[in-house]
Amino acid sequence: MPDFTTLGVPVHHWPRMVKASEITLHLQYNTATFTSPYTRTSQTTELPGALHMVEASFPAVVAAHVGELRAFFASLRGGAGRFIFPALPCRYAPRALGAPLRVTVPPLAVEGAHISAGPPHITADATTVPLEAVFTVSTCQDDNTIVGTLWLNSQRAPLQVGSPVSWDDATGWRHLHTVVAMAHDRTTGACTLTVEPPMRERPTPSTPIDVHAPSGIFRLADDGQGALRQAGRTTSFTVSAVQAFPISISVVPA
């Protein structure tokens, strides 16, 4: 059964220096409801095609970045363009498609010049602290379950129930999901994640998983998005976007 995926358009990267002050990320499912005109009973059917919706607000943009923003929105050509957008505010910019994960592990420091203690020996549980969580994939049990190892789990931004995660598939398209259940053995690091919505493409053991700075590929919700409001020397704007996926076609031989 040959499969074809049409990427169609280039994927732009959101301007790195323009960070949202507030992001509303909502997973919208695709359901259809039939209500009987006679008994008023109803039946709801879940259909495939759940998508993330995002609405982002931004603080006043400095003049140095206004031109970059205008060029970015113009290059999208309205809803025809695709762009990488972060799922969480106030973190560093998402990595480019196919780029390696960023892992920062600074050493722990003791500020005091002198330490006195009764016991003759002082031991530390750790000498470094991870700023990003590192999760690697072993296998996928089904379209909702990922089995792997949680090597490091950041205390500042840990991987936990409710965390968004993302990864790139073999074609270079980014997928965004939410962890709805998690089983973690702290002794061995073994970790099983249950994610929603169901995966369109399953990650492989070599697939980097974005935990600290997850993101998705979106399109503008309509052609009117991206209007910059200028009041004196300040420029403000908001953005509404919808998660986008390329068309996949499966051909069944006759």
Image (cartoon, grey):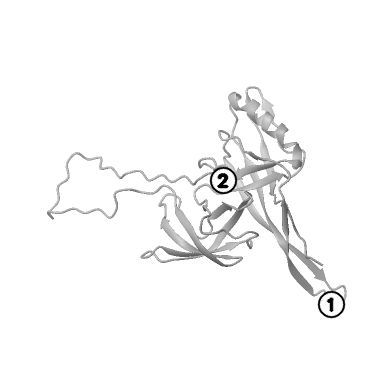
Q: Tell me what residue is drawn at x 57 percent, y 37 percent.
A: 19
Is label 1 in a helix, a strand or a loop? loop
Label 2: state its secondary structure: loop
Are there few (<14), some (14-19), or many (20+) residues within 10 Å of tag 1? few
Percent coordinates x, y for residue 46 in the rendering? 72, 67
| Residue 110, quarter of picture | top left
Instruction: List the single residue furthest toward the top.
Output: 232
At horizontal 67% and vertical 33% (from top left) the residue drawn is 72
Residue 65 placement: quadrant: top right
Given the current orientation, which residue lies at the most extreme bottom position?
A: 39
The earlier-in-sequence mark between 2 and 1 is 1
Asked if residue 50 is positioned above or below residue 109 in the image, the reply reads below
Residue situated furthest right in the rendering? 38
Q: What residue type is labelled 1?
A: Thr
Please indicate whether residue 77 sits to the left or right of residue 112 in the image: right
Residue at the image point whose x is 58% and y is 39% from the top:
20
Q: Residue 86 at what x, y percent from top left?
A: 58, 45
Position of 158 compared to 172: left or right? left
Count of numbered circles in the view:
2
Image quadrant in which the C terminus is located: bottom right
Mark 2 burial class by Cα count in 10 Å: few <14, some 14-19, many 20+: some
User: Observer-nearest residue: 228 or 134?
Assistant: 134
Which amino acid type corresponds to the residue marked 2 in the rendered image? Gly
Relative height, residue 94 to residue 207 (above, below): above
Left or right side of 134 for 45: right
The disc at residue 126 is: none
Q: Position of residue 196 (x, y in %)?
A: 61, 61
Question: Which residue is the site of mark 2?
Answer: 98
Q: Distance between the residues labelled 2 and 1?
A: 54 Å
Instruction: For the residues labelled 2 and 1, say whether their Cβ atoms are less than 8 Å apart.
Output: no
Q: Can residue 21 be seen in this view?
A: yes
Residue 39 is tagged as 1
